[in-house]
Amino acid sequence: MWAILFEEFWGDLKAQKTRAFLTMFAITWGTIAIVLLLAFGQGLGDAFMRGTVNAGNHILMIYGGETGMTYEGLPKGRRIRLDESDLALLKETIPGIDFASASYAKWGSTFAYGSVKSTTYMEGVQPQFEMLRSMYPDSGGRFIDQQDVALKRRVLFLGDSMAFRLFKGANPIGKTVTVDRVPFTVIGVMEDKLQFDNNNGPDADRAIIPASTFASMYGQHYVDHLIVRPRDVALAPRVKREVYETLGRRHKFDARDVRALGIWDFVEETKMISGISTGIQVFLTVVGGFTLLIAGVGVANIMYVVVRERTREIGVKLAVGARRKHIMSQFVFEALLLCLTGGAIGLAISGTVVGLVRMVPQSTMTLQILANPILSWPVAFTAVGILTVIGLAAGYLPARRAAAVDPVESLRYE
């Protein structure tokens, strides 16, 4: 039976080349539209998530503030300043904290390598800063470790843009750079990353030294901020509340006083970006779905025309004993095969386009965001499933009409 159906389909295809081409083109175009829309939408959402996480990997960045409430007879307006002992207390007191680091900061430090000089934002941090801020070293280098901090080593980790300004593309590992006229050895360069949020500028322009070295070199006791990451993102609200409670007891302020501490909550920011990404995906899915639906309506209209054109043929088949299910199978098979063929071509073209776009060198932030489509198997299988449903629907109704034709009346049809 299937061989007969395919033979009839092939004969009809050769006889009605234009109609078959237009039908498959509509499905192919609809498939390309929905697959590419979803691929670029998923890539856009992924880029936004990476750009957000690379600025702060689900962290809470804690700044000292100024009390806005009186507390146990103490006036409001008192300055709250944090130091490394506060970080140690938080790690000891709050079990929900996974990683943590203090950060000393300084604008305008002068870096010199030979005759090349540059100024940038410098931070003195602890080893876990690497995971907290996604500042991973490029091949051949490393980030600051615990020994560097314990021994107050003069070692330097550079953002990739800062390293290029100083070394013009040469390998900086092991080279000596003076920082405010003090020699430091470069131990690593940050690998290139996409970053949206900026805390005093992008990490690519940043320079990192051990926190202990920074405090000793500049005689600084108070940190610029503390960074902690909850063990689980679901614990973030609880950890934030416990930070206020713990530091409130130590620095004598009310745990409800939100002005006493400033907290930059990257967990909430990541949730917001995730919600925006999901919204974009839903919107593009709806648009792509309507595109496929329109293509399906086109297929159905064409199949109705086919039924009218072949009314006499259908009447002859019924008159010589063809069953109604055979007539229905013929038109359902034709519609389904056209849809699946057009869908397969559309998927092949979409996959090729995605592959070519991803081969474009991502030399700018714009290209890192836009030239990042993601074609996933679930998307492809979903598109094929939708096409199958459209093919069945587009073929069933005309097939039902064809099967209901009265043989006597159809033989009179002109």
Image (cartoon, rainbow, N blue to C red):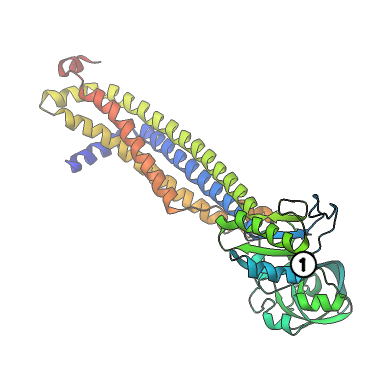
To which quarter of the image does residue 10 belong? top left
Depth check: give the residue in front, 292 or 220: 220
Q: Which residue is mark 1?
A: 206
x and y, in percent, of residue 282 in the image? 52, 40
Give above or below for 397 relative to 62.
above
Q: Residue at x 59, y 50 (%)?
A: 271
* Residue beneath the point at 62% across and 47% down: 272
In the figure, is residue 281 to the left or right of 229? left
Q: Is residue 220 left or right of residue 263?
A: right
Left or right: residue 58 versus residue 199 is left
Q: Quadrant of residue 310?
A: top left
Q: Nearer the viewer, residue 35 or 252?
A: 252
Q: Position of residue 275 (x, y in %)?
A: 58, 45
| Residue farthest along the bottom direction in this orientation | 151
For the point 68% across and 76% down, which residue is it?
143
| Near-viewer residue (41 or 391) | 41
Horizontal and vertical percent position of residue 35: 48, 45
Which is more toward the observer, 41 or 64?
64
Asked if residue 244 shows in the view, the reply is yes
Q: Quadrant of the C terminus?
A: top left
Q: Position of residue 239 (x, y in %)?
A: 62, 59
Residue at the limit of the structure toward the left, as seen here: 321
The amino acid type of the residue labelled 1 equals Arg
